[in-house]
Image (cartoon, rainbow, N blue to C red):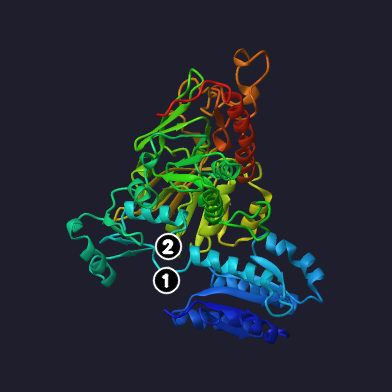
Amino acid sequence: MGAPAIVIASAHHGDVLADAFARYEREYDVRLVHDELSAKHTAKDLLATGHQVALFVVDTDHDQEKLYALIGGTRKVVPTARRLLVSHISRFRVDNADFRHAVAAGKVDALLLMPQGPRDEEFHGAVGEMLNEWNATVATPVVENVRIITPEKDALTRELLDYLGRVGMPAGVHHPDSEVGREVMAKCPDDVGRWPVVSSLVGWCGHCPSVRALANQLYGRPDEIDVDEVVDLVVVGAGPAGLAASVYASSEGLVTVCLEAEAIGGQAGTSSMIRNYLGFPRGISGMRLAQRARGQALRFGTRFFTGWPATGISPCTDGGHHIVHTEGGDVHTRSVLVATGVNYRRLGVESLEDLVGSGVYYGAAMAAARELAGDHIVIVGGGNSAGQAAIHAARFASKVTIAVRRPDLSATMSSYLINEIEWNPRITVRGSTRVVDGGPDDVRHLAWLDLEHVDSGERERVEARGLFLLIGAAPECSWLPEDVLRDERGFVLTGRDIPRELWHEDVPPQDLATSVPGIFAGGDIRAGSMKRVASATGEGASVVSLVHSWLESQATAAPVAPV
């Protein structure tokens, strides 16, 4: 396969754009054309010769009708490519008004001012972001940080790939008889016949029985924490709330440990593109946002331990410290933030539960969407996560159907996502619809689904190779002590929602404080939260001031003896 291509279409400013993109020619095949027909033929020729097209750069100097034909044509020919509109400074103000809706609807990924001279790093920063996202979600990794060796891509292998994608770690799958497979197995002779075998650049090589085992090898165990240390804050959960708390707490000098059961980023980390997060006008994937936040927290001193969920908390009863328990060890701490988020609810259709990992997935499963190129994918759910998953899946699948119990998406999804979905010709929304049955093909992979109208009960059987379930929010709080009160749905109560009889001198607890002093809750796990990335981030940042106040109130208590 040749180098991925960047195709530039410009009628009058080709020389300017050719100069600007010269810096990419070492790693990309840069092609310059002058009209929409040439762009289409060039893309087809590249695909026919084994190249991938990473980016289309389209100058707005084309006739508007031809310009929209070019935009639509590039999507039909290469739906996985990113699309960038560039505008000359003489017409940028007009173009910005004319094409704003095209960007908002996802017809193009960005509109940028044409470079004004050499080293226009604002322009190249945006191009770099788009190429970065394309490489993370579409391209075959050039350097594989993790190699998975297995004779078949079974459900566990797909789970490992999905996890590695969520943590931003390039990975590849290889047959044991391949050149790479033989090289890896030569290092792991004791594991022949136990699949999958995983090899990582950090030096580990061996049979990997679960995602948790992989996370432990990559990130370590909680029992590596010094047993005689009592930390200031343990953050349980590394979604947006937990990551924000980790950054702000450690930056303010608090000794902070973050425990994450699965992947850094939580549920938000599976979002292919978040377009309404403050400060990212061109959007950012959940994985990128999470990894940047983790990098910030690490820089300030937060210690992360991934792959061991919290199993309990022993609260302090005498002014001492809490103990957070995991199967890999205990962490002693003066305060705790519960930021474990929520899980997707189970569909409850037995025939489909048997196919989880073989065409049926809970969550966005971005790596699985790439494997379903050319197939029909059904996504169940009406929230933003479902919308983002549908848009991502439409880059690969020939058809995407969103099935939602409500009549439409207007009550549960952001309008910018609804607009993007309405424009995308590959996505269809079926309101008042639920999935009631499904079955496999001869190799036990999902092949068909039965869709039922919630009012009439009328059923239709459709062919489908992928089913992604993003339905509802199911809190997992069974590990918390009973003293941490929850509402009837299982979400943690905080602030004024805590029963009045537990208030101190008729004063309610702080907004993010639970019914147990020194234990706080933030993000989706908290009763009454907004279930949005930005609000969870805000709560994670806000809780740090409450932690400071709590620690100050305990400073006059008897000193804590070493553990």
Q: Where, by quadrant of the figure, is residue 185 drawn?
A: bottom left
- What secondary structure is found at the residue carrying circle 1? loop
Image point (53%, 58%), residue name: 392
Task: Name the residue tied to disc 2.
Answer: 170
Task: Characterize the local packing of mark 2: few (<14), some (14-19) or many (20 or more) Cα atoms within 10 angstroms.
Answer: some
Disc ID at residue 304? none
* Quadrant where the image shows the C terminus: top left
Q: Which residue is mark 1?
A: 142
Which residue is nearer to you in this view: 413 or 119? Answer: 119
Dots 2 and 1: beta carbons under 8 Å? yes
What is the three-letter code of the residue carrying label 2?
Pro
> Dot 1 surroundings within 10 Å: few (below 14), some, or many (20 or more)?
few
Disc 2 versus disc 1: distance between alpha carbons?
Answer: 8 Å
Residue at the image position 50 percent from the left and 67 percent from the top: 135
Residue 119 picture location, percent across and down: 67, 77
> Going by the image, does 471 lie left or right of 371?
right
Name the residue rendered at 55%, 45% in the picture.
Answer: 243
> Against 348, is 555 above or below?
above
- Circle count: 2
Where residue 242 appears, x then y in whole percent? 54, 41
Residue nearest the viewer, comparing 157 with 107: 157
